[in-house]
Amino acid sequence: MLAIACLAGVGHAATLAREIGPAADTTPPVNVTVTDDGQYTPQTSEVHATWSAEDPESGIDQYEYAVSSTTGAAGIVANGNWQNVGTATQGTRTSLALAEGQTYYVLVRATNSVGLTSAEAHSDGIMVAPAVESIGLAKALADGTPVSLRGKRATSNNYGGFFYLEELDRSSGIRIAGGRKRRDRQGSSTWRV
């Protein structure tokens, strides 16, 4: 409550009390941003993302997110339906059946404390890198093709911006250009070869 004092004549003060609450919020949340875990993933069953939004008038009350094969709700995948996560600003959707070579988007919408919901926002997309069984098969692909190689050994040294992957029996190896080694929770990595 805001109290305003005013003078009611020389030496006489009168107090006028008026409750001034927050301005009515008539706009939904804005600046909704969504970030997935990069350009590629080896995972066919889960997607992770972070998000944020702003609502200076009444604040964010809840976020909902979904996983889609398009940048809109029309492409929401099985087990990827809208899920309310309260005020959490990240989530991992599991039990998905994602296709190798397909790009997926995380959709997010925010609702403020007066019930107004933002427009959907989406991540820039993350492609499920196709799994390749052997380094020999990866070598046969065009340079720059994303692949998922599982069960390979990586060198611990960086040789002038490169490192190497090899089969566990050392029967074949391949030089990996640039980038950084990224492992997911299951120990898989995605490489550009």
Image (cartoon, grey):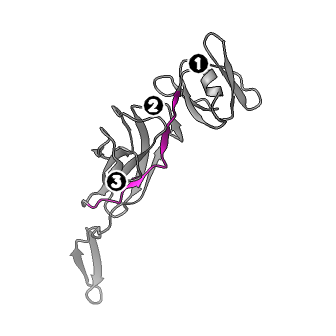
Q: Quadrant of the C terminus?
A: top right
SS for callout 2: loop
Residue depicted at 45% across the width and 49% down the height: 123
* Highlighted range, magenta: 116-131
6 in relation to 97, above or below? below
Q: State the residue lying farthest toward the right.
A: 160
Real-space CA distance between mark 1 and mark 3, rounded to the nearest whole angstrom: 39 Å
Residue 109's disc is 3
Q: Residue 103: within the magenta?
A: no
Can you give x and y, in whole percent of width and height, for residue 117 in the image? 30, 59
Q: Which tag, 3 or 2, sits closer to the chain's start?
A: 2
List the residue tagged with mark 2: 43
The crowding category of the residue bearing disc 2, from other C-alpha atoms within 10 Å (few below 14, some 14 to 19, many at least 20), is: many
Q: Amino acid at mark 3?
A: Arg
Q: State the residue lying farthest toward the top.
A: 169
Residue depicted at 58% across the width and 20% down the height: 134
The crowding category of the residue bearing disc 3, from other C-alpha atoms within 10 Å (few below 14, some 14 to 19, many at least 20), is: many
List the residue tagged with mark 1: 152
SS for callout 3: strand
Magenta span dominant secondary structure: loop
Residue depicted at 28% across the width and 76% down the height: 4
Q: Amino acid at mark 1?
A: Lys
